[in-house]
Image (cartoon, rainbow, N blue to C red):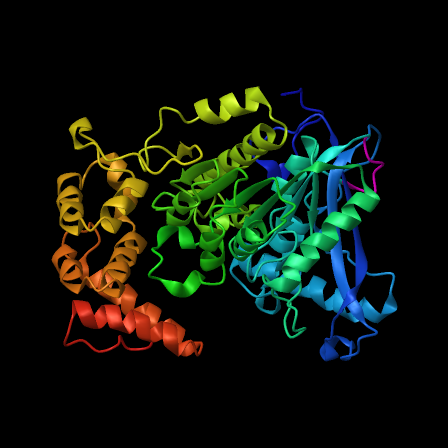
Amino acid sequence: MFVAAAAAAPPLWGGLAPGAHRVGFRSFWSADPGRSYASPECGIPADPKHPRPVLVNLWYPAAAGDGAGMPHGDYLKIAPDDSRYATLASELAEYARDVISQETLRTALEDLDDAQRATLDALLATPTASVRDAAPAPGPFPLILYHAGYGSSFEDNAVLCELLASHGYIVAGSAFLDGTGESFNIDAELDSEADLRHLIRVAGESLPVDWSRIGMVGHSGGAHTAVRFMSRLGTPLDAVVLLDTTQDYHSFADTRWNDMVPLALDSADEIRIPLLFAARQHALFRLGDSLFAAPRTYVTFRDLEHNSFISQGVMLADPATHPDAAAVRAGYDELCRAVRLFLDAELRDDPEARAALRSRWADAGPGESPVFAEFAAVGERPPAYDESLGLPPTPRQMAALLDGGDASRVGELLERFGDHPRARPFTETEFATSVMFQLVHEGREDEARGLLGHFPTPDAEILRVLGAMGNMYRRVGATHLAERFDRVLEALEPESEPAPDQ
């Protein structure tokens, strides 16, 4: 149920309204003796006597009291009690600081000039909603697990975590360290899943968790982890929010997401918990539409890019230098509202939240409106496209047409509705390259060549991007992926060679 805000929103919250609770925050390290961890560069040798250190970040509803919100930079104060992990914690904090610098200023920490360093310092000094070690409010409260994406930092979506805590959720996150100890990047595999189970246990020992209501929010690589975690037999999750998995725009012919897609498809009959997929405007949501035993909510955002689904990415949008800053900020605010309404509806069974989620964007159209929402009940597939309505198909309907072997009709519709506001998702270059990849790798080369020329994206740009993708994978040593993009390029231009490396 909706309650009056407890206080004014902090500066980084944009137009978001706090809930009834103060936000408490705790950060500490917890050792998992069931696993070991080695990082020689951080002074941790390969020794089973060194249990895996798990950074625990907890946002939670706090009791009434005094205390100002800590500055954002205090999220990086993660010194452990165990001296064995002091160097690890120090270097992880510096890694996170560099990620913040690169994501908000597009410049590595070591390359900042004086003006940029002052900007970063000001950002890190900005007050948050979090009061460190505030006394918790009496619960119990639902628990939300948060997992960041590849190359991100452990506080990358702090605004969403703070917002949920203010509305009565305990949020638990971690650094999800690469299990090899060779990188500060997220593990996103089995060690991440074990960390999630460890977080559930530790959060319950520290705060009043309602064990019957556990959700998860993951962005990008963290969303991949969430898909696998919800696909496991006996998963503890009761609802999942997937923020821009990056697979949402592609077919299953593209195997880059085989870390999660096959497991989810094999478990499709058993995945019955509510799912929220949030992505950019051209998302096709094939994975979601294959998980037909679950109720699904799809929300797409016209003005968000991949990293705008986290608060760190929104910090980049300086109104003085980014003409779309206001639209990005508004889109992120709507994303946070959608996540909160979904969790209130599904974990709290709140009828007001469910009605608000259904009505807030009821008159919207894909691409035509900043936010577009669709809902699929258990067993429902995308609604059949009805051309008599005089509207272009939605991206999900377009995916169904393509999968049904109707590529020629797709070309006709692209031509017919080229200038229609609701066809805006199909102007995305990624849509065109995804379709070309699908058709070629499904053995439908003739259809691919016949469809080329019907996209709003110029043919030359489609071919350029396909070639650039192949070269990018070649540079990082992923030859098998490079060859798959080369195959698409060769099918479309039989005399072509891989694009020159730039």
- What x and y, as percent, mark residue 121? 67, 54
**414 or 332: nearer the viewer:** 414
14 horizontally vs 177: left or right = left
**50 or 65: nearer the viewer:** 50
**At x 81% / y 40%, what residue is drawn?**
207
328 horizontally vs 84: left or right = left
**At x 30% / y 57%, what residue is drawn?**
434
- Looking at the rendered image, the quarter that the C terminus falls into is bottom left
Can residue 106 be found in the magenta stretch?
Answer: no
485 above or below 223? Answer: below
**101 or 139: nearer the viewer:** 139
The number of numbered badges drawn on the structure is 0
**At x 18% / y 75%, what residue is drawn?**
496
- What x and y, as percent, mark residue 107? 54, 63
**3 or 412: nearer the viewer:** 412
82 horizontally vs 471: left or right = right
Extent of the magenta region: 131-137
458 horizontally vs 230: left or right = left
- What x and y, as percent, mark residue 216? 61, 45
Which image quadrant is residue 466 in?
Answer: bottom left
- What x and y, as percent, mark residue 460? 19, 63
**At x 56% / y 51%, what residue is drawn?**
226
Q: Is the magenta stretch mostly helix, strand or loop?
A: loop
